[in-house]
Image (cartoon, rainbow, N blue to C red):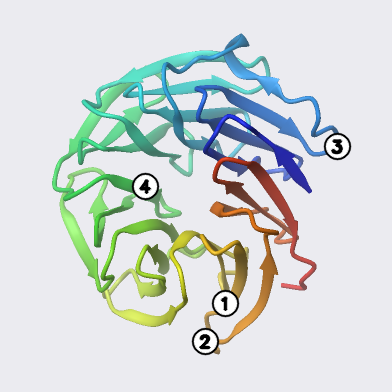
Amino acid sequence: AYVPDLTGYSVARFTPDGQSILSGHYDGTVRLWHLDNPGAPVYLGNGVPHQGPVWGVAVSPDGRFGLSASSDKTVILWDLANGQAIHRLEGHAAPVISVTFSPDGRTALSGGADEVVIVWDLDTGQLLRRFGSQRGFVRSVNFTPDGRQALTSANLTMLLWDVATGDIQQQFSGHAAEIIGARISPDGKTALSGSRDGSVRWWDLGTGRELKHLQQPGQVAGVSFSPDGRYAIVSMNTSTVFIWDLISGAKIRQFAAYGINAGEIDVRSDGQMALSSAWGEGLIVWRLDYTW
């Protein structure tokens, strides 16, 4: 399925039940789409809540709340049931690029062009702590499944943090160009990173060791895990999405995006669909048609 959007870059995530999509757009809008009626999105905040492009979105584990991160230097916490803002989180000194919820939904991480990661209390909307050891735009932020650690990427490096103390516990290096996306596996033991150098790398979070890597023509636009953690789903700026078997190292399937440059990618909780943004075009929902 293809959802057109003529407002420029878009980012999107599935809701946990897989029935809806939360998206953020270059025009500053945040939208909730229902897959059974994709032609009638709900515009959160009754219009244009951000005064600049939205670069990141996230959905809470229980599906009740959303987050949007914008170049207007703010993050908005949304009630997805009524489409209204709960808190506007202010603390970054430059555009906010990435955002995510903690596993319990009570805190959030955001990363910005100010090379800073912020931990937020979502009950109060207050800033809890700030990590400032990044060296570049913070393109991705992730919590481990237990919520105790955070994985962030900036420029050529990923860092694993202790959320409570801000101590760096592991550093991951190996890419020759900026890391554009990173994800933690469902079991919290490994991570994926994808780079503008065309490589995807699979890492052991505990040791910092690279387990495997795959080199492709073009630039990686997004990475995600299958629900069982065995496969990587990777989007490229060459109008393709492919599935990489992390155990065998083989690229087992590839999908064409019909000339549309795929952006970030997200996999539905049942593994049957993938969602990719499309630069200057819209959102693409892929039916993976694969037995995980």
Residue that mark 3 sits on: 36
Residue that mark 2 sits on: 249
Using the image as rendered, state which of residue 85 and residue 55 is in the foreground: 55
Q: Residue furthest right?
A: 36
Q: Position of residue 202 (x, y in %)?
A: 41, 74
Q: Does dot 1 land on a helix, a strand or a loop?
A: strand
Q: Residue furthest top?
A: 46
Disc 1 to disc 2, how far (Cα)?
7 Å
Q: Earlier in the sequence, mark 3 or mark 2?
A: 3
- Callout 1: few (<14), some (14-19), or many (20+) C-alpha neighbours within 10 Å? many
- Callout 4: few (<14), some (14-19), or many (20+) C-alpha neighbours within 10 Å? many
Kindly identify the residue that appears in the image at 39 percent across and 74 percent down. 201
Kindly identify the residue that appears in the image at 55 percent across and 29 percent down. 66
Residue that mark 1 sits on: 244
Using the image as rendered, state which of residue 242 and residue 167 is in the foreground: 242
Q: Amino acid at mark 4?
A: Val
Q: Is residue 176 left or right of residue 216?
A: left
Q: Position of residue 103 (x, y in %)?
A: 48, 44
Disc 4 to disc 1, how far (Cα)?
22 Å
Give the answer, above or below, for where 94 lies relative to 261.
above
Q: Does dot 3 land on a helix, a strand or a loop?
A: loop
Residue that mark 4 sits on: 141
